[in-house]
Amino acid sequence: MRILVVGSGAREHAIAWKLSRDPGVDHVICAPGNPGMSCARVALDPLDIDAVLQCVQRERIDLTVIGPEAPLGRGLADRLAAEGLRVFGPTRAAAQLETSKAFAKDFMRRHGVPTAHYRVCVSEQEALSAIRSGEFGEALVVKADGLAAGKGVVVAPDRRAAEAAVRSAMVDRSFGDAGARVVLEEMLQGPELSFFVVADGERYVPLLTAQDHKRIFDGDSGPNTGGMGAFSPSPLMSSALQALIEREIVQPVLRGMVSEDNPFRGFLYVGLMLTADGPKVIEFNVRFGDPEAQVVMPLLNEPLAPLLWACAAGRTGSPGRTGAVSVGVVLAAHGYPGEVRSGDVITGLDDVGRDCPDVTVFFGGVQRRGRDLVTSGGRVLTVVATADTFKIAIARAYEAASKIHFDGMQYRRDIGQKALAASSRE
């Protein structure tokens, strides 16, 4: 089987890394990929639908796996399927679960999926009036409606901060057109959990759980990012909780998409808050998360390609997993999540490869300059360690991270501590 993975980040590196190890997979190509990846790469723009189609045809690709959300929002899966090509990823209409937070919230309301109370606002005046009315209390969440690279969410501790977030999104257009509408939400309380399934339109297969760390600084402080690290599986998940999530959230979502003539095929990422009233949806992603993919892929002990192939054809299989755990630490560039500096030389990767067993480094924002790898994006590397316990995995990940250097490198020192805390309460 010849597989094309569309995308260039650490998520796509992790997916390609897993697929390349599957028996029966002859060739994995990443488009465009990045120089840290060992697979073949094709230079193209993932948003150029015609270029991707030509690549699939030229390279005789059997299965295309779409990594990032933006090409899905552009309709890449639709175009490939229309040409009779097998593709793993939802249609443009189904991808609205992520590409429009307003669509997702209204969809959940229609189909009885538990989520926070909300209001969709199409003007600054409407949003400010809703904030000042007290409808959401003092603290609330402000979300840009469209795609904002994981940064369009502001958790506002008070109304003044919420009003500033609205002006930033709707007036200053900090997130471009993504902020033309905003969604105001009540502030939910409880631990967060990410649950993943692979869906074929009507049926689904649960994968592992994970917990992400969105804030830039230790202790969940500072601005939101695309994710500064993760661990898997989550100690918060139990068989009873999983059954509840599947019954009240996953199954109604898939049934609802079918009833609205938008069957969902692909990775469905359900971001949850475990509230006192039960699990509620914070957000959906219609592709695997980053950095969640990096910590989940090393734990799957059965081939991934047959599962994705079957789901793309409208039928599911079931992957197995190891009994291990994993911890992933993101090494970010200077300035992230704001204006990022590029071009800093990365050193120490050979030391990790030589001295750190059970550690894999997945490459994101990197490029080649002569013989050197240099930074070229916000989240540069994800250092992932696997072990029998979270304590050992955390130690391994941070030992490896300490061997890597580039000017301005920043990373959190507390990734995985929530897993230790939750495990100690069991």
Image (spheres, helix red, strand yellow):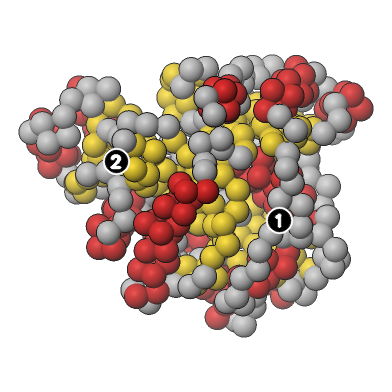
Q: Quadrant of the N terminus?
A: bottom right
Residue type of the residue flagged with mark 1:
Gly
Mark toward the start of the polypeptide (2 vs 1): 2
Which of 289 and 335 lies nearest the eye of the viewer? 289
Q: Is residue 115 above or below residue 348?
A: below
Residue that label 2 marks? 277
Q: Are marks 2 and 1 in contact (CB under 8 Å)?
A: no
Circle 1 residue: 320
Q: Is residue 358 visible?
A: yes
Q: Quadrant of residue 386?
A: top right
Viewer-nearest residue: 247 or 401: 247
Q: Could you tell me which residue is drawn at 72 percent across and 68 percent down?
A: 306
Find residue 234 and report its horizontal and vertical position in percent. Answer: 56, 37
Q: CA gap, disc 2 to disc 1?
A: 32 Å
Q: Residues within 10 Å of mark 1 (few under 14, many from 20)?
A: few
Residue 298 in the figure: left or right of residue 45: right
Q: Position of residue 104 (x, y in %)?
A: 33, 55
Where's the C terminus, which quadrant? top right
Q: Residues within 10 Å of mark 2 (few under 14, many from 20)?
A: few
The quarter holding residue 42 reads bottom right
Task: Residue at 17%, 34% (x, y): give it.
Answer: 136
